[in-house]
Every structure is written in structure tokens, then in C-alpha cells.
Image (spheres, grey):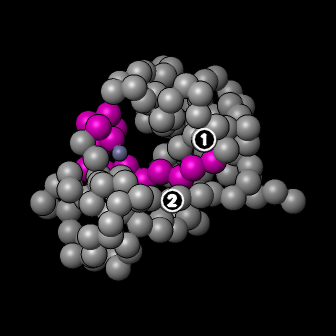
Amino acid sequence: MDHLTAGGCLCGAVRYEASGELRNVTHCHCADCRRSAGAAFVTWASFWQKDFHFMKGETRELEFAGRLRGFCPNCGTTLTFRSSPATDEIDVTVASFDEPAKVWPGDHIWVEDRLPWIALADGLTVYRRNRSEAVAGNS
Ligand SMILES: [Zn+2]
Ligand SMILES: [Zn+2]
């Protein structure tokens, strides 16, 4: 049986389910994620778009810098990210999962934007920008 991940927003207007393996579970420290979520960094997991479905309601997507960020239209919870309208992947906020504690992030990305008062001490791989660039080490 496929692994099923369920979650939703704070107010309950948007609920989703995703099947298949979680890929690229990462803490993103980029300035856009930070501001859009109103949080120091955002933890994402990637699913194939075909495996992701809204069970109740749906996000309102905002296009910014060519990327699509999805929020609950009622309560504003940050839920999804797509790199373009045509992409076959969707990133979902791990903190909106019903069981986020079962998920273990694999790395940190965009640490060049990291706030100085966030100390990384988890030993995970650290990327200065995205995962295709050189490893910066953990410090
Ligand atoms: Zn909501
Ligand atoms: Zn980001």
C-alpha cells in the first residue's frame, strides 16, 4: 500500500492527501519562504503533482518571482509551493502535516539567507543555495 500523507491548514477549510514517498525533505532558509510564511524558515517535502489531492477546499495560489505559493484562502496557512505552473512536482509544508513528527528532514538549503539567530546544530547537510550547488558544511 502506498504511503499516505494527510494534512491541512489551521482553520480546516483546506485538507489534502498525498501518496507516494516524500522526497527532498528540507529546511529552506530563503528570504521568500521566510516572508511568505512569517517564520524564520520553512520545512518542505516534495510530492509528484499527480499524487497530491485536495480533499476539502483548495489553496489560493499567489505568483511571486515566477513561483506559485499556495495558502488557505480563509486562514492564510502556508501550504504549497510550485516552481512554475507546468511543473510535475509540488512542495508541501511539513508543519501542516497531521503527523509532522514522523518526518525527518534531510538537509538545509539557502543558508546564505539564514537568520543569524538560527543556529544549525543537527548535523544535516547544508547548502548555500539550492541542492545543486556545493555543500557549505554545517556550522
Ligand atoms: Zn484555513
Ligand atoms: Zn525557500
Residue range highlighted in magenta: 32-47
Element assignment for label 1: strand
Amino acid at pointer 2:
Val
Query: Quick one: 97 or 52, which is closer to the camera?
Result: 52
Q: Position of residue 22 (x, y in %)?
A: 63, 57
Disc with the residue nearer the chain's start (2 vs 1): 2
- Reply above or below: 95 against 32: below
Inspect the magenta stretch and tell me whether residue 39 lies in it: yes
Instruction: Please name the residue that numbered disc 1 is placed on.
Output: 89
Element assignment for label 2: strand
Image check: 36 left or right of 94?
left
Q: In percent of the image, x 12 and y 60: which residue is there?
A: 116
Look at the image and tell me in which quarter the N terminus lies: bottom right
Q: In percent of the image, x 50 and y 20: which residue is there?
A: 60
Image check: 97 left or right of 127?
right
Q: Position of residue 136 (x, y in %)?
A: 26, 70
Look at the image and tell me in which quarter the C terminus lies: bottom left
Q: In percent of the image, x 42 and y 21: which residue is there?
A: 62
Residue 10 seen anywhere in this rendered image of the structure: no
Image check: 18 left or right of 14?
right
**Quadrant location of residue 14?**
top right
Q: Are marks 2 and 1 in contact (CB under 8 Å)?
A: no
Q: Position of residue 4 (x, y in %)?
A: 74, 53
Query: Which residue reaches farthest right?
Result: 1
Instruction: Please name the residue that numbered disc 2 is placed on.
Output: 25
For residue 68, the mark is none
How busy is the neighbourhood of tag 2: few (under 14 within 10 Å), some, or many (20 plus)?
many
Amino acid at pointer 1:
Glu
